[in-house]
Image (cartoon, helix red, strand yellow):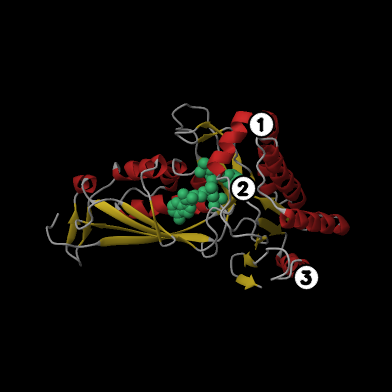
Amino acid sequence: MATEKWVFMVTAQTPTNIAVIKYWGKRDEVRILPVNDSISVTLDPDHLCTVTTVAVSPAFDRDRMWLNGKEISLTGSRYQNCLREIRSRADDVEDKEKGIKIGKKDWEKLHLHIASHNNFPTAAGLASSAAGFACLVFSLAKLMNVDEDPSHLSAIARQGSGSACRSLFGGFVKWEMGSKDDGSDSVAVQLADEKHWDDLVIIIAVVSSQQKETSSTSGMRESVETSLLLQHRAKEVVPKRILQMEEAIKNRDFASFTQLTCTDSNQFHAVCLDTSPPIFYMNDTSHRIISLVEKWNRSEGTPQVAYTFDAGPNAVLIARNRKVAVQLLQGLLYYFPPKSDTDMKSYVVGDNSILKEAG
Ligand code: ADP
Ligand code: DP6
Ligand code: CO
């Protein structure tokens, strides 16, 4: 390693993913091993995403991280686990143009500065931890010349936030809970790539961008400790639902997809209510959006839109095609006009080619 001062940096961008069969509950808090399989759809990387820059320099005296411009502590075990796992796989790096040479062993002594930005609300139920930890692991791997096989990186990202393991793949992704104690078979696998069902258009209705009161991590811990419904869901409901959802995705069967997605979202929120003390992630506006979509689907006779809500009030609406998406957006703007008495602020429409903000 040269003695002069230099900075070597890498930037990466990673999309968020939204679960259609939810992960809620861990059997191992340290390794982040779930109580059930889950399935998600990864959003277009240019829309809701995290951008992270990681830099290394002999001038840095400790590891530091800034999230959305504010310094955060890296002492938590999730950040430490990700940093340790990537550092242990680091390889030689050479940038001839800048005359930088970093040997495998140097990474143990060198410190990092990390700056990360989410282009969507953080800790508001739009899976910022998924995009965030996937991006952290991916950018560190690029910086340290680690083998970038998505399966390996996914297993590391899982130790930052469970849902992050699914963001290393595009399209539809399943996180298999696995059965081994060491977590080696708790992995994400791609079910279908992003081109498989490209009629679908995803609309995110940002009901509130405020940080939630109960983080996903502590919410699911309380549910595991107190909810009987969670036990029933994990053992009896989700295993069958996963098989049905895989079939629906394979056959691009929108009616089954919608039925499974909406029911699973509602059961997840029922588990939150069954938790003691109860956790309320959705608000009145969320409930009104559910009613609107349910009524519309019923009046059409066949489902047009699926809804799902993560651990927050914001709606993720999946329209069966672009024409339906346009009608849905018009309906949302009509029933929830921006600056009305509800706190609905904006809508982001994403499919493979468009991003619009309305309101
Ligand atoms: P969300 O519903 O947004 O995923 P969580 O409660 O699961 O909310 O996680 C929010 C936490 O995830 C944040 O408080 C922060 O610790 C972490 N996080 C969010 N974005 C990033 C990021 N870009 N890089 C690293 N960590 C992040
Ligand atoms: C409701 O992955 O955020 O979004 O593993 O504790 O970081 P930790 O939790 P997190 O939980 C996500 C919960 C969910 C459903 C899902 O993404 O499957
Ligand atoms: Co999260």
Residue at image point 69% right, 58% down: 317
Q: Give the distance between the C-alpha atoms of the residues marked 2 and 1, in whole angstroms.
A: 16 Å
Name which residue type carries label 2. Ala
Left or right for 233, reference 157: right
Inspect this view and state whether residue 134 appears. Answer: no
Nearest the viewer among 220 and 341 is 341
Q: Secondary structure at mark 3?
A: helix
> What amino acid is labelled 1 in the image?
Ser
Return the disc, 3 or 1, that comes first in the chain's sequence. 1
**Residue for badge 2:** 311
Ligand 2 neighbours mark 1 (CB distance < 8 Å):
no
Q: In the drawing, does residue 255 fall left or right of residue 202?
A: right
Q: CA distance from mark 2 to mark 3?
A: 26 Å
Question: Quick check: can you spot residue 327?
Answer: yes
Would you call the spot at circle 3 few (<14 residues within 10 Å), some (14-19), or many (20 or more)? Answer: few
- The percent position of residue 211, horizontal first and vertical second, equals 56, 54
Task: Quickly name the residue at label 3.
Answer: 334
Q: Is mark 2 within 8 Å of ligand 2?
A: yes
Residue with the mark numbered 1: 227
Mark 1 Cα shell of 10 Å, populated few (<14), some (14-19), many (≥20): many
Disc number for residue 293? none
Q: Earlier in the sequence, mark 2 or mark 1?
A: 1
